[in-house]
Each structure stands twice: as C-alpha cells, then as structure tokens.
Image: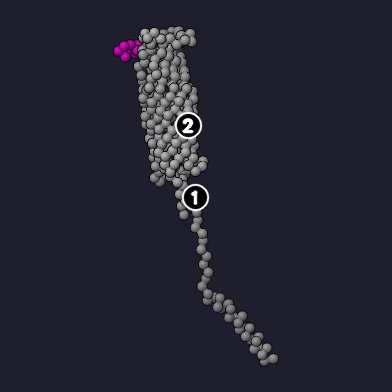
C-alpha cells in the first residue's frame, strides 16, 4: 500500500512539472519561402520582323515652265493601297525608358488619279511602289507593353503618268523622293521574345519637278508633284537579348 501511494505521488509531481519545463523552452521559429515578384520584361536587344498595312498619299500637280515657275495648278488626288515588308532594329532599356534605332523597307501598291486642269481630256496618275524609313525611337515601357515615338528620314519610290483614253501618252522615270517621317506605336509582348505592334507613320515627301516624255522621247510637260503620306501598319517582331529577369 505504501509503494502504491508513493507511485501516485511521483506521477502527480511529474505531470505538474511538464508545463513549467515547456514554458522555459525557446519559441519555435518558422522560415518563410521568398516571395516571387512578377518578372520584369526587358525590351533590350536586336529584333527582326515583318509588317503590313494600308496607306494613303495626297498628290498635287502644278504645271511649271522651264525656269520652275508655276503656270497653273493641275489638280490633286489621293492614292491608296496596301504595303508589306520588314524591319530590323535595336533597343536599349534603362528603367522604364526605351531607346532604339529602326530600319524599315516595304513594297507598296498605292494608286490614284485625277483629271488634268491644265490639259483637259488628260488624266494625271500617281503610284507609290516602295518606301523606306530610317528612324530613332524613344518609348516608355509598362512591363510587357511599350508606347513609343519615332522620327527620322524617309525615301519613297514614286511613278507618275499622263493618260488619255486609258492609254499612257507620257510618263516620268521612277522618282526616288527623300523626306522625313514621324510616327507613334504601341507594342505588346505576347510570348517570350515575341511582340506585336500597331503603328502610324506620317511621311513628309519632298516636292519634285517631274519631266514627262512620250514614248518617242519628246517632252510632253513638266509638273511639280507634291504631297505627304500616312501609313498604318501591324508589325510582328522577334527579339534577341534582354532576358526576362525575376526579382525577389
């Protein structure tokens, strides 16, 4: 009986001591996994792509004499049509700001005509066969979205004809006209290294004194052809460099 009483007292003493010992133990700490912040897209690197779209060009003809003085306005018309080509360039990103250089070349099929005022019964026809843009860019990035402005030089391949009864009676050799350009664009990355953009460009095309000759080589007339163009395009680019860098 004495041993039983001693055993019960010993168990009671041990149960009373356990909470006190547990209270003296240091609190357990738990380590948390690092929080992954969404990756930041980097627009830096070289890119190569394709583009296509629709353009319009305003062409006004003025009849001039041999000294270049205007004899009379010969009418205006709009050319319109599609274009397609490619572009390549390089961009560098610092913070949200993006700088770059872009070279673009396109085949074009813009056509239009109007009746001649100076030579009644004849039709003046204009065509744009190709154009190239050489521009710098500055943009602001919202991670995978980029808004940018561009500006620089432009070159346009024009052809002009004088028609009567549907037959070309006089034409001018292909004219390569230099000018300037400004544009705006919005570009979005839809996959690693791939992006698509919508872009508008205005081309300031230089005036040009154009000599029209017949098939026999005789001079028909001389006109000053002038006017600008607007182009809206969709671009798809593949970029090298500028990896997506995760931030912790």
Q: Distance from label 2 to label 1 (Cα)?
A: 31 Å
Residue depicted at x 47% and y 33%: 50
Determine the residue located farthest toward the bottom in the rendered image.
2
Label 2, secondary structure: give it.
strand
The x and y percentages for residue 205 are 38, 24
Looking at the image, the residue that sits furthest to the left is 67
Magenta stretch holds residue 65: yes
Q: Which residues are magenta?
A: 63-72
Q: Nearer the viewer, mark 2 or mark 1?
A: 2
Q: Residue at x 43, y 12 (%)?
A: 162
Question: Can see residue 178?
Answer: yes
195 relative to 59, above or below: below
**x and y, in percent, of residue 219 in the image:** 36, 9
| Quarter occupied by the N terminus | bottom right
Q: Secondary structure at mark 1?
A: strand
Camera-nearest residue between 113 and 88: 88
Compare residues 230 and 217 and report the one nearer the observer: 217
Q: Which mark is residue 38?
A: 1
Alpha-carbon neighbours of circle 1 within 10 Å: few (<14), some, or many (≥20)? few
Mark drawn on residue 200? none
Q: Which mark is residue 51?
A: 2
What residue do we see at 49% from left, 32% from top? 234
């Amino acid at each position: 009986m004495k041993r039983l009483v001693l055993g019960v007292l010993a168990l009671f003493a041990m149960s009373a001591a356990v909470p006190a010992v547990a209270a003296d133990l240091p609190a357990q700490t738990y380590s948390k996994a690092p929080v992954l912040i969404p990756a930041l897209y980097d627009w830096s690197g070289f890119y190569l792509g394709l583009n296509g779209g629709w353009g319009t060009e305003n062409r006004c003809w003025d009849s001039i004499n041999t000294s270049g003085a205007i004899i009379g306005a010969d009418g205006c018309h709009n050319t319109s049509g599609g274009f397609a080509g490619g572009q390549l360039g390089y961009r560098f990103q610092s913070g949200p700001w993006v700088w770059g250089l872009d070279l673009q070349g396109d085949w074009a099929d813009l056509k239009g005509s109007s009746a001649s005022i100076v030579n009644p019964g004849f039709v003046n026809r204009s065509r744009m066969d190709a154009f190239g843009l050489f521009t710098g860019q500055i943009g602001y990035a919202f991670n995978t979205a980029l808004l940018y402005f561009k500006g620089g030089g432009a070159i346009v391949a024009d052809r002009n004809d004088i028609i009567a009864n549907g037959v070309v009676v006089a034409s001018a050799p292909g004219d390569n006209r230099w000018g300037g350009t400004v544009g705006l664009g919005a570009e979005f990355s839809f996959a690693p290294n791939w992006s698509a953009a919508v872009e508008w460009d205005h081309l300031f095309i230089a005036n040009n004194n154009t000599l029209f000759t017949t098939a026999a080589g005789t001079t028909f007339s001389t006109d000053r052809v002038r006017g600008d163009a607007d182009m809206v395009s969709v671009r798809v680019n593949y970029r090298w460099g500028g990896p997506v860098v995760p931030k912790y």
